[in-house]
Amino acid sequence: MCRVLKVSRSGCYAWRGRQPSRREVEDQGLVDRIRVIHAESREPYGSPRIHRALRHDEIWVGRKRIARLMR
């Protein structure tokens, strides 16, 4: 597989063993919160309303980031 993808074996194993980045951890927390808001609203909410609900909870993130996570 490493030969086909043209990556070193050591690089592949290093990538597998890495901890998730801070952004990935934050994104997962946001996805969990978005799912809760979406379920509580009976699921008609899109990214603008989710953004507004997060701002109400004093979670400051961009609307485009929310849209990306909702995809």
Image (cartoon, grey):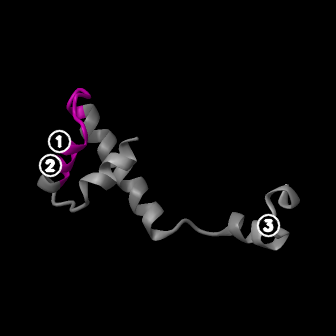
Q: Quadrant of residue 13?
A: bottom right
Residue on which the image places disc 1: 49
| Relative vertical location of residue 3 with respect to residue 49 in this rendering, above or below | below
Residue 41 forms part of the magenta stretch:
yes
Nearest to N terminus: mark 3 or mark 2:
3
Task: Tell me, for residue 21, which label it has, or none.
Answer: none
Residue on which the image places disc 3: 7
Of labels 1 and 3, the one closer to you: 3
The alpha-carbon separation of the residues under discs 1 and 2 comes to 5 Å
Q: Position of residue 52 (x, y in %)?
A: 14, 49
For badge 1, the amino acid type reads: Arg
- Secondary element at tag 1: helix
Q: Position of residue 49 (x, y in %)?
A: 17, 42
Residue on which the image places disc 2: 52
Nearest to N terminus: mark 1 or mark 3:
3
Q: Is residue 36 left or right of residue 19?
A: left
The alpha-carbon separation of the residues under discs 3 and 2 comes to 43 Å
Callout 1 environment at 10 Å: few (<14), some (14 to 19), or many (20+)?
some
Q: Is residue 30 left or right of residue 22?
A: left
The alpha-carbon separation of the residues under discs 1 and 3 comes to 43 Å
Count of labels in the image: 3
Cβ–Cβ below 8 Å for labels 1 and 2?
A: yes
Q: Main secondary structure of the magenta part?
A: helix
Segment tinted magenta in the rendering: 40-54
- Secondary element at tag 2: helix
Cβ–Cβ below 8 Å for labels 3 and 2?
A: no
Q: Quadrant of residue 16?
A: bottom right
Q: Is residue 71 left or right of residue 48?
A: right
Of labels 3 and 2, the one closer to you: 3
Q: Residue at x 45, y 62 (%)?
A: 25
Q: Position of residue 54 (x, y in %)?
A: 20, 52
